[in-house]
Image (tube, rainbow, N blue to C red):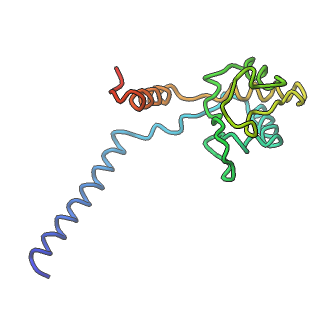
Amino acid sequence: MRSGEKNIYIIIAVLVIGMISYRGYQEITDPDPGIPYYTTASPELKQTADKIYKDNKCSDCHSLWMIRNMMASVPAPPLDGIGDIRNEQWFYDYLSSENPQTILPTRLNATYKMPSYAHLPEQDRRTLAAYLASLKVEDWYLEETKKREYEKLTGKKYPQ
């Protein structure tokens, strides 16, 4: 091995060790804040709502806990954190409406529009409404999302 090759290998090794060390330092100084989504629902409410959610194939269009049906191609909104946007009464009215588009219009093709769940028993609609209202997002994530969206839309740094 020539001395020039040896020097290149040494430089590469130093760079790799430096990058690994820096990554370790970042982990210590900037710990992962964790998953930003959570629910305030009781275990019983969650279990009952999950069954209604699955029975009605809600996952064909919506993701929950960042899990999306791999076969779905519908651009429906994710449900994670939606309880910070709407309240339980709103969800109940929406799920009970014969035509949900009168409450929340959509630009989706008619095939993919939110169907009415007015046919479900009232208790099921109330359970789903309570559960959807319990889906929250951590405050730090909302702030990060606002910042990213502002900068993406305006091309300017987010005002502090």
Q: Residue drawn at (66%, 37%), measured in percent from left and top?
A: 76
Quadrant assignment, res 46: top right
Total tally of numbered discs in the picture: 0
Judge by depth and name the residue closer to the eye, 64 or 116. Answer: 116
Q: Residue drawn at (24%, 55%), measured in percent from left and top?
A: 18
Can you give x and y, in whole percent of width and height, for residue 135 in the image? 65, 29
Quadrant assignment, res 41: top right
Question: Horizontally, is 149 left or right of 157 in the view?
Answer: right
Question: Horizontally, is 14 left or right of 37 in the view?
Answer: left
| Residue extending farthest left | 3
Quadrant assignment, res 44: top right
Relative to 158, say whether 63 is above or below: below
Judge by depth and name the residue closer to the eye, 64 or 118. Answer: 118
**In the picture, which quadrant includes the C terminus?**
top left
Q: Residue drawn at (44%, 41%), measured in percent from left and top?
A: 32
Can you give x and y, in whole percent of width and height, for residue 14 in the image? 20, 61
Can you give x and y, in whole percent of width and height, for residue 121 in the image? 90, 28
Relative to 36, say whether 19 is above or below: below
Judge by depth and name the residue closer to the eye, 66 or 117. Answer: 117
